[in-house]
Image (cartoon, grey):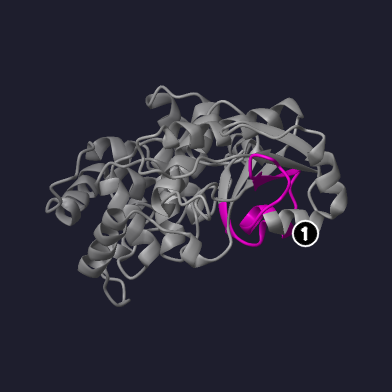
Amino acid sequence: MPLEIIRNDITQVHADAIVNAASPDLLGGSGVDGRIHEVAGKELLEECKSLGGCQVGQAKITKAYKLPAKYVIHTVGPVWQGGNHNEERLLKECYKNSLLLAKKYNLESIAFPLIASGTFGYPKDKALKTAIATIGEFLLDNEILVYLVVYDKKAFKLSKNLFTSIKQYIDDNYVEEKTPGRDEIRTYYQLKEFKLEETVELLNESLQSSAKYKRNLKDVVNNIDETFSQMLLRLIDEKGMTDAETYKKANIDRKLFSKIRNNIDYSPSKSTVLAFAVALSLSLDEAKDLLLKAGFALSNSNKFDIIIQFFIENENYDIFEINEALFAFNQNLLGL
């Protein structure tokens, strides 16, 4: 199941469990900890008193009482001391141990705050990077829906270097929407009317200026009658990947992938297509081919498209990092 970044008050999230960034005594405190105890009611405090506290990096579970969740998983994050006191390792353990506890209780969904990034002083960009990496690694081998809950935009901070690079790329590539030209109108579906030689000639004419054009044009034409589902499954085989590996790397739910596999004429969303393009580490040209099979194209008048193109051109296929960037720029996320 996927990882979804959402903007919300974690005490209002409907999940099997929400995670409390707790103090070591588990008796409530400020920030997320205080808010969770306030909404849950005094019964939560009474149960927490029986747990005997919690060590940094560890996790313990209680009922959720008046919260909309079923359980609260309490974990104690590290206090930031400059980064040389095992802070990153301990923060990873917070996420990992909380997820393992959710797995032990057979939970289907869990919601995390950005642990240790408040009163504990962990830099928000570093906290976010660690959260995404640890959750993403867990999801490659486990089935659970994970929410990373951001209370407001100020609490979310993308790496400054990455944000600046993407912003510059958008500034360099963004153009106002215009009437489609000849190359944009003649999609591969329209090329079905041409003979093979004429098709290859036209594709060469349209794309010969692209230094990154890496695939064989005859192969493109030979597969022109494939549906999106057929092309996706062929690519998975060609990449030597399993179905599970593919949909997990795409941040796609297993049930959705099953629909795609079992329906030759399945019509996916653009976000779904691009999620698979990222999971399969497709080149930009290959990603465009897959989009065309579903009736979509990349546009330089669409910031969402430009951000995706930025990551593909830089051969960064970490879908969770891509979703961090999309969230930071107020765009829809991939997969889900």
- Measuring 30% from the left and 64% from the top, which residue is drawn there? 184
Left or right for 277, reference 255: left
Q: Which residues are magenta?
A: 5-33
84 or 294: nearer the viewer: 84
Residue 166: x and y in percent read 29, 59
Q: Is residue 40 left or right of residue 97?
A: right
Total marks placed: 1
Quarter of the rendering containing residue 298: bottom left
Dividing the picture into quadrants, the one containing residue 16 is top right
Q: Residues within 10 Å of mark 1 (few under 14, many from 20)?
A: some
Residue sitting nearer the eye, 315 or 283: 315
Q: Amino acid at mark 1?
A: Glu
| Foreground residue among 3 and 297 | 3
**Which quadrant of the structure image shows residue 318?**
top left
Residue holding disc 1 = 38
The reply to whether residue 224 is in sight is yes
Residue occupying image coordinates x 50% and y 40%: 78
Q: Is residue 280 above or below residue 65?
A: above
* Relative image position of residue 183 (x, y in whole percent): 25, 62
Where, quadrant-wise, is the N terminus in this rendering? top right
Relative height, residue 151 to residue 80 (above, below): below
Magenta run includes residue 284: no
- Left or right of 288 in this view: 61: right
